[in-house]
Amino acid sequence: MASVIIIPIVIVAVAGLSAYLVYRYAMYDFLCKRSVNQTLKRYNIKKTPSQIIKEYYEQKDEKKSHKEILNLEKYYRQKEPDQFLAMYDVLREK
C-alpha cells in the first residue's frame, strides 16, 4: 500500500531534479550566451566576448591563459553581462 504512494513521489522527484539540472547547467548558460551576443550585436560590436576579455587584460598588462579567459567569460556572461560593454568602452577609449 505504501509503495502506491512512494513510487510516484520518487518518480516525480527524480524527473523534477533532472529537469532542474538540465536547465541550470545547459539551458541557463545557453540563454546567457545568447543574451550577451544579442547585446553586442545591438551595439554593432564585432568582437566576441572572449576577444574583449583578452584585449582588456592585455591592455592592463595582465597575462591570462586561454582557460582563464574562458572561465572569466562564463562568469561575466552569467553574473555580470554588462561588464562586456564596460570593458569594450575602456578598450575603445584607449
Image (tube, rainbow, N blue to C red):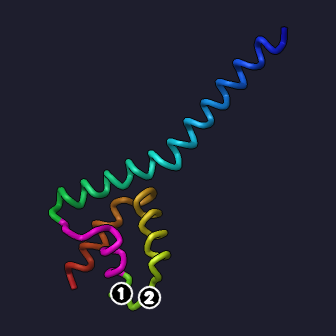
| Mark 1 or mark 2, earlier in chain | 1
Badge 1 crowding class, 10 Å Cα cut-off, few under 14, some 14 to 19, many 20 or more, is: few
Give the number of callouts.
Answer: 2
Magenta residues, start to end: 45-56
Q: Residue at x 76, y 13 (%)?
A: 5
Which residue bears the numbered disc 2? 63
Residue 93, image x, y percentages: 20, 81
**Quadrant of the rendered structure where residue 70 is?**
bottom left
Residue 13, image x, y percentages: 67, 28
Query: Any magenta on residue 49?
Result: yes
Screen quadrant of the C terminus: bottom left
Left or right: 4 as drawn, with respect to 87: right
Query: Any magenta on residue 61?
Result: no
For numbered disc 2, what is the local secondary structure? loop
Badge 2 crowding class, 10 Å Cα cut-off, few under 14, some 14 to 19, many 20 or more, is: few
Amino acid type for the residue under numbered disc 1: Glu
In this view of the protein, which residue sits in the foreground, 43 or 6? Answer: 6
Screen quadrant of the N terminus: top right
Considering the whole magenta stretch, tell me its main secondary structure: helix
In this view of the protein, which residue sits in the foreground, 11 or 31? Answer: 11
Left or right: 91 as drawn, with respect to 75: left
**Quadrant of the rendered structure where residue 61 is?**
bottom left
**Quadrant of the rendered structure where residue 8 is?**
top right
Gap between marks 1 and 2 measured at Cα: 6 Å
Residue 87, image x, y percentages: 31, 73
Which residue bears the numbered disc 1? 58
Q: Is residue 36 above or below residue 15?
A: below
Left or right: 37 as drawn, with respect to 19: left
Q: Residue at x 26, y 73 (%)?
A: 88
- The answer to whether the residues at label 1 and label 2 have Cβ atoms under 8 Å apart is yes
